[in-house]
Image (cartoon, rainbow, N blue to C red):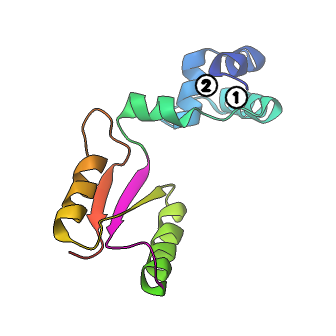
């Protein structure tokens, strides 16, 4: 698997420049951007989502708590939510709250722990 260092060497630019292109965080000259994009394609580079989440404190994941995982209602609802989240580059994380308010609160609490956070936000589908 190619690293950011491999991309920078292939493109003849610094690792910081590769990072700027990948993250879109600041201006990079058109020529350098093209070099980086070509190197990314050539090497098959894919950013490490775990490293990005650690660096930015954002996971790109949204959690939804449903009372139960079975049934057509929640299945259709979750599919619609996932379709919309994907349009904006987010991922859906689903957990069941065991059909009671306390179970749903525990599911939300476990997805929002500060140091081992796996989602950026959690939403109860129904309390």
Task: Identify the residue at image location x=43%, y=85%.
Answer: 73
- Quarter of the image that includes the N terminus: top right
Mark 1 or mark 2, which is nearer the start of the sequence? 2
Q: Which mark is residue 18?
A: 2
Task: Identify the residue at image location x=61%, y=14%.
Answer: 14
Q: Residue furthest left?
A: 102
Q: Is residue 90 left or right of residue 104?
A: right
For the residues marked 2 and 1, what is the alpha-carbon distance in whole angstroms? 6 Å
**Image: 16 above or below 68:** above
Q: Is residue 67 left or right of residue 91?
A: left
Q: Quadrant of residue 124?
A: bottom left
**Image: 82 above or below 116:** below
Q: Residue furthest right?
A: 42
Start and end of the magenta stretch?
60-71
> What x and y, as percent, mark residue 64?
35, 64
- Quarter of the image that includes the C terminus: bottom left
Q: Dot 2: what SS? A: helix
Question: Is 69 contained in the magenta span?
Answer: yes
Q: Residues within 10 Å of mark 2 (few under 14, many from 20)?
A: many
**Camera sees residue 26:** no
Task: Identify the residue at image location x=25%, y=41%.
Answer: 113
Q: Is residue 123 left or right of residue 8?
A: left
Query: Pointer 2 and pointer 1: residues touching (CB < 8 Å)?
Result: yes
> What x and y, as percent, mark residue 31?
70, 29
| Residue denoted by label 1 | 36
Q: How many marks?
A: 2
């Amino acid at each position: 698997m190619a690293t950011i260092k491999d991309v920078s060497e292939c493109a003849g630019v610094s690792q910081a420049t590769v990072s700027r292109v990948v993250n879109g965080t600041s201006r990079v000259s058109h020529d350098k951007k093209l070099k980086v994009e070509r190197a990314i394609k050539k090497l098959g580079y894919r950013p490490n989502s775990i490293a990005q989440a650690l660096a930015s404190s954002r996971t790109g994941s949204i959690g939804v708590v449903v009372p139960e995982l079975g049934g057509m209602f929640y299945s259709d609802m979750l599919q619609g939510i996932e379709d919309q989240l994907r349009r904006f580059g987010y991922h859906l994380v689903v957990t069941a709250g065991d059909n009671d308010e306390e179970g749903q609160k525990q599911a939300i609490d476990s997805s929002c722990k500060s140091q081992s956070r796996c989602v950026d936000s959690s939403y109860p589908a129904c309390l």
